[in-house]
Amino acid sequence: MQNTPLIGKTIREARLREAAGVSVIGVWQGGRLLPPHPDLLLDEMSLPVVMGTREQIDELNIMLVIYSANDEPVLVIGGGTVGQAATRALRRQNIGVHLIEIAPCAGLEAIPDRLFAGDAADLRVLMEAGLDKTPSVLLTTHDDATNIFLAVYCRRLNPEVRIVSRITYERNVEAILRAGANFVLSEAWLGAEIVMAQLMGRETIILGEGVELMTLPLPSSLAGQTLAESGIGARTGLNVIAIEQDGAFVANPPPSVPLRRDCQLVALGSLAQRQVFDAAYSNGEA
């Protein structure tokens, strides 16, 4: 979002569907995935989540890439297993990477574009690695307290940088978001998501901490109502992003779309919101 014409516009004003055919299904702001309300204002740290075909996503990237003038390497802090995997993944996408590791192992220098041996808490090391220029910082150390400290430190030194962090314990997610991270993934949540995906026979889809993509059979009490009349969003907090009917999908359905008895709802939300949905509609309430 940074440096694009979308800053300062609402989702309605951004007109991404008209421009590229994609549907906005949520917006990450302040570490939270918000429903795509048409009047939601986009700022420099907003991260819209869009849905579309490969061609539509490519078209959107072409539209916005001209505004992403920062081609400086991404800064990865922590050269352990996670840091190395992230570095390799970024480089496979032809994204430059500078890696900081306090105790580099043999051969580590061959993984990033450039390796900086030293403590990331050292201002000199951070600046030599390019913190003041990088568009993004990835915190991958195995210590939550260290990642929280580094999130605060990096945010103060570069208020515009996007910070993504690993967290070992889910209880520390709120702390690192307050510290300045834009996006957080905990190992506990990732592990649970992978196990559930395997049990349900589906691909693992990572949308963010605590956010899941779920398919819900339409409760009989809602059959014949429109999506707006169902009140699903207001009552449960779930964001219905598509409706599946006879093998066909209606993406980003309008509030006026009728809900047929045999349709299924594709929604984004948390486990707690799913439980609210089940409780609200399982007893025939409308």
Image (spheres, rainbow, N blue to C red):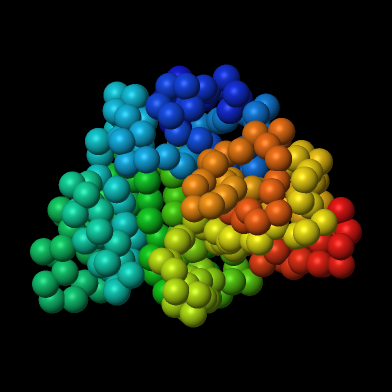
> Residue 217 location, x and y as percent?
66, 61
Residue at point 13%, 76% (across, down): 106
Residue at point 78%, 44% (across, down): 225
Picture layout, residue 69 above or below residue 57: above
* Residue 36 in the figure: left or right of residue 64: right
Picture layout, residue 258 above or below residue 217: above
**Residue 255 lies in quadrant:** top right
Residue at point 71%, 54% (across, down): 261
> Residue 114 location, x and y as percent?
16, 54
Q: Nearer the viewer, residue 120 or 163?
A: 163
Picture layout, residue 67 above or below residue 281: above
Q: Nearer the viewer, residue 189 or 166?
A: 189
> Residue 41 location, x and y as percent?
62, 28
**Can see residue 186?**
yes
**Residue 202 lies in quadrant:** bottom left
Q: Nearer the viewer, residue 164 or 212?
A: 212
**Can see residue 119?**
no
Residue at point 29%, 74% (across, down): 81
Picture layout, residue 143 above or below residue 27: below
> Residue 209 location, x and y as percent?
55, 61
* Residue 280 in the figure: left or right of residue 208: right
